[in-house]
Amino acid sequence: MSSKLAGPNIQLNELGKLKHFLTLEGLKAHHLTEILDTAESFINPVTNEIKKVPILRGKSIMNLFFEPSTRTRTTFEIAEKRLSADIESLDIQTSATKKGESLLDTLWNLQAMQADMFVIRHAESGAAHFFSQHVAPHVHVMNAGDGQHAHPTQAMLDMYTIRKHKGDIYDLTVAIIGDVLHSRVVRSQIQALSILEAREIRVIGPKTLMPESPEALGVHVYHNMEEGLKDVDVIIMVRLQNERMTSALIPSEKEFFKVYGLTEERLALAKPDAIVMHPGPINRGVEIDSAVADGSQSVILEQVTYGIAVRMAVMAIIMSNAAQLSQHKLEQEQQANLDLIEQNNQAEGTL
Amino acid sequence: MRRIIKNGRVIDPSQNLDKVTNVYFSRGRIVAVSDEAPEGFNADQEVDATGKWVLPGLVDLHARLGEPGSQYTGSIASETKAAVSGGITSICCPPDTAPVNDSQAVTELIQRRGRQAATAFVMPIGAMTQGLDGERLSNSFSLKDAGCIALSQANKPIQNSLTLKNALEYNSTLDIPIFLRSEDKQLRNGGIAHSGPVSSRLGLPENPPAAETAALARDLVLVEQSGVKAHFSQLSCARSVELIADAKKRGLPVTCDVAIHQLHLSEMDLLGFNSLFNVSPPLRSMSDKQALIYGVKTGVIDAIVSDHTPLDRDAKLLPFGESAPGISGLETLMALVLKLVQNGDLDLMTAVRSVTQKPAEIIDCKTGCLTEGHSADICIVDPEAIWTLDTQQMLSKGKNTPFAGWEFVGQVEQTFFQGRPVFRL
């Protein structure tokens, strides 16, 4: 058993390019910009339609969902189909592991069925890291959400949406409102915004929904909506899950809406051209007022479309990086051979 | 058979002894520690320990031996061999076996297996409640009669305050220590990582220090009220050290220990989601670690334990939160204690005392010292040997250690148990 620390950069290959997509932590701005630019190239600028391209023809992608999901799974499947990949989706919670098969045995069996990439959603933080350490070297892992840790493709589609409306991110003040403690989406959003050097990242919510050290994430914490929303460019609302009430983290939906709900009056505190985002599904009247959700500043539905393009972009980049790496290795080998021949020639010459 | 260990640097904290001299032993007992042979002592064998350290065999208050219940991850025979290879000759094993050690039959089984292995003292700790359910008191007087040297709840602390109060009061006349691990299950709320910057970043469920300290404060109140002799196991927080220091100042009959990995690792080690760092209580902050080391240094923390938990490969081949907590620690206890000395954190005498004299006193057993008439449990350490931990070389069936690849200075070269050689490098 290896005790070697597997830092976030296990997702980069020898050339420093994406090999897996597990988290945004440890990535550079150029990695993120490449994803956003590539995503843009898949979207028809006039009709907003997403093209079908043959980039992943002959490649096999398996979507492993250890945790239920409809939207993420559907957008991943659409993205894979638009890239012309062969796809297979498995609901693992209902099959193999119930029969007592170990997690890794399941993974290795699927790998033996010639998978090139796994898209994994799992309820444990760090699950995608774990799988990436145990797949064969040619197999890639994409994190479709692991526990409360990361949901990097969701965060990237949010960055895409922001860039689309606001241009460069470095000059923006962004407020994220709601359950930061339990949200993998928020963690990834914060990382993306930090990497792209947003001017200020604020998180707003009650203390019971904040992690122990939110400052460690590089954000400013507000417990008051009115103060936190002042002059922000982007407002990201986070879904409030029902179980937060039963575990006594907040008293009621009504009270939460009263203190942290996004109403038109509160929205007016932000910059006049501020945009409102929500990763969905939205709870109208719990975290967001219907008038705001359907209002002119809301970009909630666009996010879904961009989600497809961003996921296509990440998959395309990972596969092209792999091809580039094997090309690079081949060239190195050839160069080594040439060097050897030259050396031999020289040696002969000196004789 | 009569033996002499000659010219070694003999370090025995129980006698405040640290000098180059000889150890004489015969028929399993120490005869003398002196420069001159006792009258009429003719050795059958001489062991030259020039340049080596001669220590009492270590006493480990908390090591799981896998038996009964999970023999394939460790047996008393395999784990005692691992123990003596690390200089440990007395082992207390917690009651979270399968079945739970809440009956004379299980206690006797463990003792019998220990005697059969004949490699180290195996001292069972009995369960405080039946099946460790935290509700029904176990037959503690029978357990003591059968040979249990203490009672504990292992990693399942009693949550109900009234039950705990009753358990402590009932057992206050038992005259063996009660081992308590303080943890409030509700406050822990399924947390597996210290709540701090690392858990905030990784999104691992948070286990706050309050889960330990709030429970410890309650436990101390109940201990004071019952007058029981209590020993707190595996502290992990700076605040806990203060609470114990306070209790000791007030004259409470309490002692405590810390697991050796808490003195070397911290929450920062979780950054790669490596499940080998999953332990319970969790690895905490750097300042908690420093406070624990300081606690050992000042004597607030009495003993250092291995908290040995051998696990099979599959138990760790899982995402962090699904993996089983625990470290296979018998073979690294001595090396990691010596590392604290080399780092300048502890002086040698204090370090050795925390794994010999102090733990032996807590369970009131006559080991962990080299005084005349006591069991000849001795280990010889080469203080200059440099070695690297390789899991393939480990004797324990559990290879689950985060210390693989660590370089250590100082290695156990030979161990004697009851005067017989049981390990030789």
Image (spheres, coloured by chain):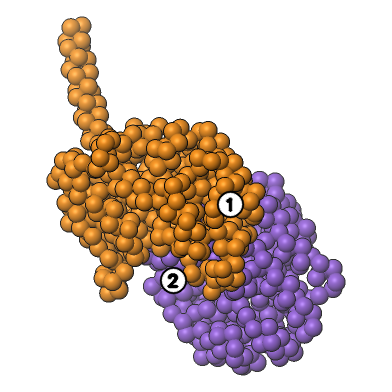
Quadrant in which residue B396 is drawn: bottom left
Residue B254 at least partly seen: yes
Residue B259 at least partly seen: no
Front residue of A305 and B140:
A305
Direction from residue A287 to residue B221 in the image, left or right: right
Residue at 62% across, 81% down: B158
Direction from residue B220 to residue A298 in the image, left or right: left
Residue A42 x %, y %: 26, 38
Quadrant in which residue B234 is drawn: bottom right
Front residue of B309 and A297:
A297
Q: What residue would you read off at disc 2?
A: B74
User: Callout 1 environment at 10 Å: few (<14), some (14 to 19), or many (20+)?
Assistant: some
Quadrant in which residue B371 is drawn: bottom right
Residue B411 x %, y %: 56, 52
Instruction: Give the purple chain's letter.
Output: B
Residue at 58% across, 52% down: A265
Q: What residue would you read off at disc 1?
A: A266
Element marked by disc 2: loop
**Which amino acid type corresponds to the residue marked 2 in the rendered image?**
Gly
Residue B352 x %, y %: 68, 59
Of the chain colours in the picture, the one used for chain A is orange
Total numbered labels: 2
B39 to A332, vertically: above or below: below
